[in-house]
């Protein structure tokens, strides 16, 4: 087993930001090394700088010449630049596929074509991929009926095309393993010919005992939100909810975590909310969990998500979650969130107010639920054990 290498094809990583999908394959790589596999990454200089901090033995096959400078991915010019870089990384990956040997395994860490197709074209004896989120359907793109469809539609069309191509090519392989993060993905995989033993649910992954778990800090903020400024995240609904809660709850305080201050602060000031809203800026993982524990409810007004880890992290901190009842949440988070009819902002506001007042009065619905079961199902360790078990089966030909 010590001679088997797992090649993590990760052409998707840019810049200094580490996204949820990046954390996921980092943890799978860590588990692979602990299980006796060798680990090699295919990716750019940005990936190289991150994996060097992992503290695990690894090698890197570089697929770019230098770290890509910042671009405006929201503009046509930026999207063209990004696609050109994808294509260059893909070509360089293909030119170096000879380092993947027949006894090795190859793992696509996203469903994008520039990660999946090199895996498909490699000679690895076992091939794996993870499917994190369903792309919008073509009709949803044309009608702009899903909240994550961009105004220009170019990125959404690329995502739709990429996912369809990747799944079709990968699912046609004879020896494969697909990890999916949501039960709703199963019917499509079945239609593509993936057999039950070739696909498994893998959790988004949370630390069941995050930093500071033993601490019991006092509550400072009534509500907390974390995310990027995009209509997909329900920003307008968030703002009108904060406005109402400020008017109806005495000394209401809301915390916004992340790099949204430059975009949201002027709006907050125009609405006269500056005394009620506080910005933490970008924070470490340890600080994020501390701030969660200092808050009474987590506001999740997103209009579309996959299975966001941040909800799982809030649940681990026994932080009540208020969310729209969009189709992806219940199969994953079940009773651990409080749902309101999708996009009914009045219902969202009412439930947020109800839960804030309940927690202020010492009542938290989380304390009545089986949190230990959720921790076990959603933990990194559970996901890692599944990944290693399936990798071993492919390596051993079973």
Image (tube, helix red, strand yellow):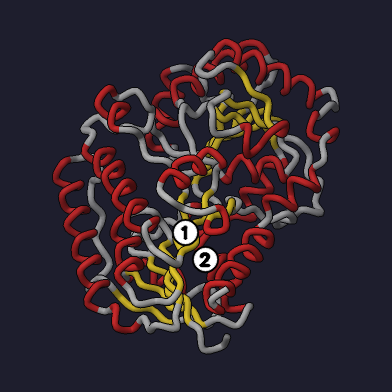
Residue drawn at point x = 72 percent, y = 17 percent: 354
Query: Residue 173 appears at what percent x and percent y?
Result: 38, 63
The answer to whether the residues at label 1 and label 2 have Cβ atoms under 8 Å apart is yes
Q: Pointer 1: what residue?
A: 22
Residue 112 lies, with reference to residue 315, above or below; the image says below
Residue 139 lies, with reference to residue 349, above or below; the image says below
Image quarter of residue 232? top left
Image quarter of residue 363? top right
User: Which secondary structure, mark 2?
Assistant: helix
Depth order, front residue of 395/217: 395
Residue drawn at point x = 56 percent, y = 20 percent: 242
User: Which secondary structure, mark 1?
Assistant: helix
Query: Residue 217 appears at what percent x and percent y?
Result: 78, 44
In the rendered structure, the answer to whether residue 205 lies left or right of residue 215 reads left
Depth order, front residue of 44/356: 44
Residue 242 lies, with reference to residue 74, above or below; the image says above
Residue drawn at point x = 38 percent, y = 34 percent: 263
Mark 1 packing: few (<14 Cα in 10 Å), some, or many (20+)?
some
In the rendered structure, the answer to whether residue 71 lies left or right of residue 368 reads left
Depth order, front residue of 260/374: 374
User: Which mark is drawn over residue 116?
Assistant: none
Mark 2 packing: few (<14 Cα in 10 Å), some, or many (20+)?
some
Depth order, front residue of 340/386: 386
């Amino acid at each position: 087993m010590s001679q088997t290498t797992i090649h993590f094809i990760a052409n998707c990583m840019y810049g200094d930001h580490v996204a949820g999908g990046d954390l996921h394959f980092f943890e799978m790589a860590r588990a692979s090394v602990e299980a006796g596999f060798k680990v090699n990454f295919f990716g750019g200089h940005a990936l190289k700088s991150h994996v060097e901090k992992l503290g695990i033995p690894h090698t890197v096959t570089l697929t770019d010449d230098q770290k890509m400078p910042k671009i405006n991915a929201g503009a046509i010019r930026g999207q063209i630049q990004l696609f050109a870089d994808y294509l260059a990384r893909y070509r360089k990956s293909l030119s170096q596929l000879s380092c993947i040997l027949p006894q090795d395994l190859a793992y696509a860490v996203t469903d994008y074509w520039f990660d999946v197709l090199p895996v498909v074209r490699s000679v690895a004896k076992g091939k794996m991929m993870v499917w994190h989120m369903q792309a919008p359907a073509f009709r949803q793109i044309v009608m702009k009926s899903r909240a994550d469809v961009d105004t220009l539609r170019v990125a959404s069309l690329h995502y739709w095309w990429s996912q369809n191509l990747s799944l079709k090519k990968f699912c046609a392989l004879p020896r494969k393993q697909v990890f999916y993060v949501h039960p709703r993905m199963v019917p499509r995989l079945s239609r593509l010919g993936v057999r039950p033993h070739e696909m498994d649910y893998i959790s988004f992954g949370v630390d069941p005992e995050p930093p500071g778990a033993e601490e019991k800090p006092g509550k400072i903020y009534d509500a907390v939100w974390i995310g990027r400024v995009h209509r997909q995240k329900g920003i307008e609904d968030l703002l009108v909810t904060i406005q109402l809660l400020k008017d109806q709850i005495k000394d209401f305080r809301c915390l916004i975590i992340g790099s949204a201050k430059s975009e949201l602060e002027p709006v907050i000031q125009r609405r006269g909310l500056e005394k009620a809203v506080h910005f933490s800026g970008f924070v470490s993982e340890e600080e994020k969990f501390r701030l969660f524990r200092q808050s009474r409810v987590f506001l999740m007004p997103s209009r579309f998500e996959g299975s966001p880890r941040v909800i799982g992290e809030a649940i681990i901190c026994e932080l009540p979650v208020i969310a729209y009842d969009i189709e992806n949440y219940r199969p994953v988070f079940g009773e651990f969130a409080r749902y309101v009819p999708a996009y009914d902002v009045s219902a969202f506001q009412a439930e947020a107010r109800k839960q804030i007042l309940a927690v202020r009065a010492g009542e938290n619905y989380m304390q009545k639920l089986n949190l230990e079961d959720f921790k076990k199902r959603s933990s990194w360790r559970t996901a890692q054990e599944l990944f290693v078990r399936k990798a071993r089966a492919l390596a051993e030909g079973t």
